[in-house]
Image (tube, rainbow, N blue to C red):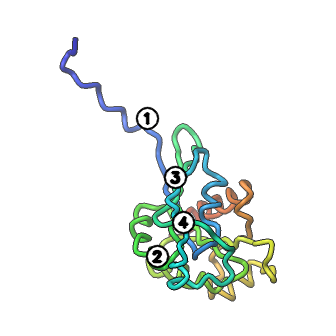
């Protein structure tokens, strides 16, 4: 028999805290792969088959042949401790879906701008997006095996006209450890900015 009483709300102090991180970059740079490499749960993916129509809108030069593309977001989770959970939101890379970036950015600790070592110039609009909004971010260059050139972090800073204080990492998002190092670098960057401010 129901007593008519509702169960008490949990003590807010006992609930885990959460951190939101946005993973952004141009089409085909490896955002979905990064989220999948580090997520402890099967990532939520909103991919659709490529119809060919995308190539009239996007420039696929330098992008691996693809059968699917993210149309809304990728979502993953990492439990750091009983008190802290990290939620990863991978943003769609096509220009026509960029309107959702501000929504995904809301409440985020910061962002990882994932760049493609074969076409760094495709990162200019992404860097500009976060720069204009004052969002803390790091640049992580996904080093593809077929890249014709290997960049050093200081070269990436020059090519992308980044402030020398902007962290730049070289990574392979297929490797869990490499992807985790990118996320750690973002958290360290945010802490450093807060301590300096």
Q: Earlier in the sequence, mark 2 or mark 4?
A: 4
Q: Name the mark nearer the viewer: 4 or 1.
A: 4
Q: What residue is pinned by disc 4? A: 49
First along the sequence among labels 2 and 3: 3
How would you rate the neighbour count of disc 1 (Cα within 10 Å): few for under 14, some for 14-19, many for 20 or more?
few
> Residue 78: which numbered mark, if any?
none
Instruction: Report the Cα–Cα distance between label 3 and label 4.
Output: 16 Å
Give the number of the mark in front: 3 or 4. 4
The residue tagged with tag 1: helix, strand or loop?
A: helix
Residue in view at x 22 percent, y 15 percent: 2
**Quick check: marks 3 and 1 in contact, CB under 8 Å?**
no
96 displayed left or right of 6: right
Give how far apart the Cα atoms at labels 4 and 1 are: 42 Å
Which residue is disc 3 drawn over?
44
**Circles 2, 4 touching at the beta carbon (< 8 Å):** no
Q: Residues within 10 Å of mark 4 (few under 14, many from 20)?
A: few
Foreground label between 3 and 1 = 3
Q: Residue at x 65, y 75 (%)?
A: 115
Within 10 Å of disc 2 (Cα), the crowding (few <14, some 14-19, many 20+) is: few
Residue 60 appears left or right of 172: left
Q: Which mark is residue 134?
A: 2
In the foreground, 99 or 46: 46
Packing grade of label 3 (10 A; few <14, some 14-19, many >=20) is: some
Nearest the viewer among 67 and 147 is 67
Q: Is residue 152 left or right of residue 129?
A: right
Relative vertical location of residue 176 with respect to residue 40 in this rendering, above or below = below
* Residue 6 position in % (x across, y down): 24, 25
Give the answer, above or below, for where 62 lies relative to 185.
below
Residue drawn at the location 78% of the way across and 80% of the way down = 151
Separation of disc 3 and disc 1 at Cα?
A: 27 Å
Which residue in the protein does label 1 denote? 14
Viewer-nearest of labels 2 and 3? 3
């Amino acid at each position: 028999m129901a007593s008519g009483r509702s169960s008490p709300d949990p003590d807010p102090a006992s609930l885990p805290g959460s951190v939101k991180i946005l993973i952004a970059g141009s089409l085909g740079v490896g955002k979905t792969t990064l989220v999948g490499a580090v997520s402890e749960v099967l990532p939520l993916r909103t991919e659709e088959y490529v119809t060919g129509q995308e190539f009239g809108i996007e420039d696929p030069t330098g992008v691996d042949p693809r059968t699917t593309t993210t149309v809304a977001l990728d979502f993953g989770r990492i439990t750091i401790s009983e008190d802290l959970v990290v939620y990863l939101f991978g943003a769609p890379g096509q220009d026509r879906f960029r309107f959702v970036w501000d929504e995904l950015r809301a409440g985020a600790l910061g962002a990882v701008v994932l760049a493609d070592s074969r076409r760094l110039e495709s990162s200019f609009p992404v860097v500009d997006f976060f720069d204009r909004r004052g969002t803390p971010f790091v640049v992580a260059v996904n080093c593809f095996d077929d890249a014709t050139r290997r960049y050093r972090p200081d070269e990436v800073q020059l090519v992308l006209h980044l402030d020398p204080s902007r962290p730049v990492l070289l990574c392979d998002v297929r490797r869990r450890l490499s992807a985790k190092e990118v996320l750690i670098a973002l958290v360290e960057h945010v802490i450093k900015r807060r301590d300096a401010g």
